[in-house]
Amino acid sequence: MADAEGRRRRATGRVTLADVAEAAGVSPITVSRALRGERAVAAELVERVRAAAAALGYVPDPAARALASSRSSHVAVLIPKLSNTLFVDLLDAVQHTLVPAGYQTLIGVTHYDAAEEEASLRNVLAHRPAGLIVTGSERSPAALALIQGSGVPCVRVMDVGREPGGYSVGFSQADAGRAITQHLLDTGRRRIVYAAAQLDPRTLERGAGYKAAMQEAGLASAVHHVTTPEPSSMALGASLLVRALNEAPKTDAIFFCNDDLAQGALLAALRLGLAVPRRLAVAGFNDLPGSDQMVPALTTVATPRRAIGEEAAQMLLALMRGQPVPAPHLDLGFQVVRRASS
């Protein structure tokens, strides 16, 4: 590390390790060891080096450090969207777990697009991360090859796998879809529509759970999906509500794949004079902020996104440290939250 950073030229404007060594009156290798906290360096020298580094505004070069030690202090995290509270909460939990352990995150956003995920993987893997967290299990052969070929420990989040050699933290999307549909059935609803946007694999799994619950209740002929590949939003939820009622006027409940859709539907029902839940029950998914403040409050599925982020980060830390992982596929479950909209 000392050689790699020491050869940086002053012309770059960057304070180098050699600059700190000169200011502290020690060798570059001593600076390197002192800043890494190695016990072999005397306390007086450590203090002198740290004072010089602080005075000069020195920031270690992570690329040089990785080359010198064959270790990186970065973990790459790939998520579909930064605008979705679900993934913001998960990412925040990952950071709160990794930062105290000495790691920072490199964030890649895939926008639910296979080509963008491949590009993000190429970008973050070029930085030689110590570990990788990806969202979901469905990805292209090229993306799988990039992950497997990198040799970087990888943990998957938001669903639970079963494959040997893999690692995942999440819950069953299909079981959650089945559970919220069963709740609507238990309230006496029989003409339930599943309304979904984005149509990523997890959304489709929720739909499969809905269909399974309807079939188990002997209502296979009443299964009705109202879907669009458009991004999920409150405005779209209002449109899907109107579309569902136009396509199936006798609909008595709608299960929306995400809370923002359901929130938009509740506002549309208010404008249209539809009594919720007397005329129409509404349910969402993910228990996003504001769902408990809707009028009426939204029935939904609470997903443990913060716990998923924390457990995935802990699992990845164990893998990066070469420690055993007793449960490579961790199911954290979910909770049906019954509120006034159903």
Image (cartoon, rainbow, N blue to C red):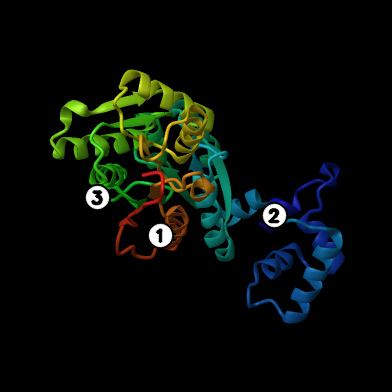
* Residue denoted by label 1: 315
Q: Is residue 72 visible?
A: no
Question: Marks 3 and 2, how far apart in space?
Answer: 42 Å
Residue 259: percent from the left, percent from the top?
46, 40
Which image quarter: residue 223? top left
Check disc 3: other Cα within 10 Å, few if <14, some if 14-19, many if 20+: few
Q: Residue at 42% of width from left, 36% of height from top?
A: 275
Left or right for 295, reference 9: left
Left or right for 338, reference 184: right
Q: Quadrant of the C terminus?
A: top left
Q: Is residue 18 above or below residue 255?
A: below
Question: Marks 1 and 2, how far apart in space?
Answer: 34 Å
Q: Is residue 263 above or below residue 14?
A: above
| Amino acid carrying mark 3 in the image | Pro
* Residue denoted by label 2: 3
Residue 292: percent from the left, percent from the top?
49, 50
Q: Quadrant of the N terminus?
A: bottom right
| Amino acid carrying mark 1 in the image | Met
Residue 192: percent from the left, percent from the top?
28, 33
Left or right for 83, reference 80: right
45 vs 267, nearest the viewer: 267
Q: Residue at 46% of width from left, 55% of height from top?
A: 309
